[in-house]
Image (tube, rainbow, N blue to C red):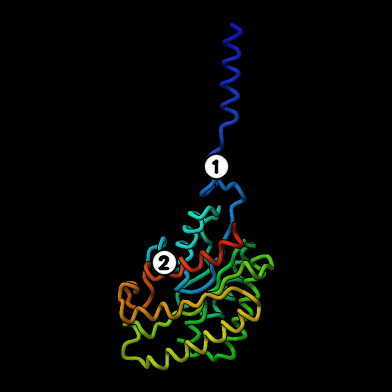
Amino acid sequence: MRSGIILLFCLLQLACTKSDPSTTVYTGTGGNTSPRKTWLALGDSYTIGQSVEASSRFPTQTANLLKLSGVNIADPDFIATTGWTTNNLATAITTQSPAIHDVVSLLIGVNDQYQTHDTSGYRQRFTGLLNKAIQLANGKTDHVFVLSIPDYSVTPFAAGSDTARIRKELDWFNAINKNVTESYGIAYLDITPSTREAKTNPALLAGDGLHPSGLEYAKWANRLVSLMLPVLK
C-alpha cells in the first residue's frame, strides 16, 4: 500500500513539472535558452516582399538563418507597404507606435525617387527615420541595419523609360542614405550592385518583372546575417 502511494506521488510530481507548451520557446542550435530576440523591419515593397511568398522576404530568410546559427529570434515584425515613401513610413510609425525591438532594419527611398521627390528633402526625411529606428532599437546604434535602395532600372518594368536617368537618380538617393547612415556609425548593407545582376539573370526577379525574387532576397539575407550575428548572440 505504501509503495502505491509513493508511485502515485511520483506520477503527480512528473505531471506538475511538465513544460507548458504555451511557454515553450525556440532554443536554436546548441540549446540557446536566452530570451527571444525581436526584429522590426521598416520599409516599402522590398521589405514586405511584394510578389514573393512571405517566407521569401529578406527579413524572414535572415531570421531563419539566425535561428540556424543558434539565435533565439522571433519572426520579424513589419511596418512596410508597397508604394510607401519616407513620408508614408514616418506616418505609419507614428500611428502604429511600435514597441522597442532588439534589432531594427530600414530600407526606404525608391518611391521618393519614383515620385520625383527632391534629394534634399529625402536627406531630411531619411535622417528622421533613422533616428526613429535608433529609438526603436532602444538607442543602440549597433542594433540598427540600413540597406541601400535596389536598382529597378534593369527590370522589364523600366523598359522604355530613361533607365540611365533612373540609375543616376538612385545613385544620388543611395549616396544620401549611405552618408547619413555612416555618420551615425550604423551598419550599411549595399545591395544595389547585386540587384543590377537581374539585367542578365531573370531568375533574380519576381513574376511581376519589377521586384526581386526570393533568390535575390536570399543573397541579401546571407550578407545581413553576418552583420546581425555579433549583436544578437
Residue 137 is marked as: none
Q: Kindly identify the amino acid type of the residue bearing the numbered disc 2.
A: Ala
Q: Residues within 10 Å of mark 1 (few under 14, many from 20)?
A: few
Is disc 1 in contact with disc 2, using a CB cutoff of under 8 Å?
no
Mark 2, secondary structure of its residue: helix
Q: Which of marks 1 and 2 is nearer the N terminus?
A: 1
Up the image or down, 152 lies above or below 80; here it is: below
Distance, label 1 to label 2, CA atoms, is 31 Å
- Pair 1/2: label in front: 2
Percent from the top left, x then y, of residue 2? 61, 8
Give the position of the N terminus as an image quadrant.
top right
Q: Residues within 10 Å of mark 2 (few under 14, many from 20)?
A: many
Disc 2 target residue:
218
* Residue drawn at the location 53% of the way across and 47% of the way down: 30
Up the image or down, 50 lies above or below 157; here it is: above
Residue 26 in sight in this render: no
Disc 1 target residue:
22
* Residue drawn at the location 45% of the way across and 86% of the way down: 114
Dividing the picture into quarters, in which one does residue 220 lie?
A: bottom left
Give the position of the C terminus as an image quadrant.
bottom right
Horizontally, residue 55 falls left or right of residue 160, namely right
Percent from the top left, x then y, of residue 141? 65, 70
Q: Kindly identify the amino acid type of the residue bearing the numbered disc 1.
A: Ser
Mark 1, secondary structure of its residue: helix
* Residue drawn at the location 51% of the way across and 58% of the way down: 66
* Residue drawn at the location 51% of the way across and 68% of the way down: 224
Dividing the picture into quarters, in which one does residue 103 lie?
A: bottom right
Horizontally, residue 188 falls left or right of residue 210, namely right
Dividing the picture into quarters, in which one does residue 121 lie?
A: bottom right
Q: Which residue lies furthest to the right in this view?
A: 139
Residue 126 in sight in this render: yes
Closer to the camera in the image, 154 or 119: 154
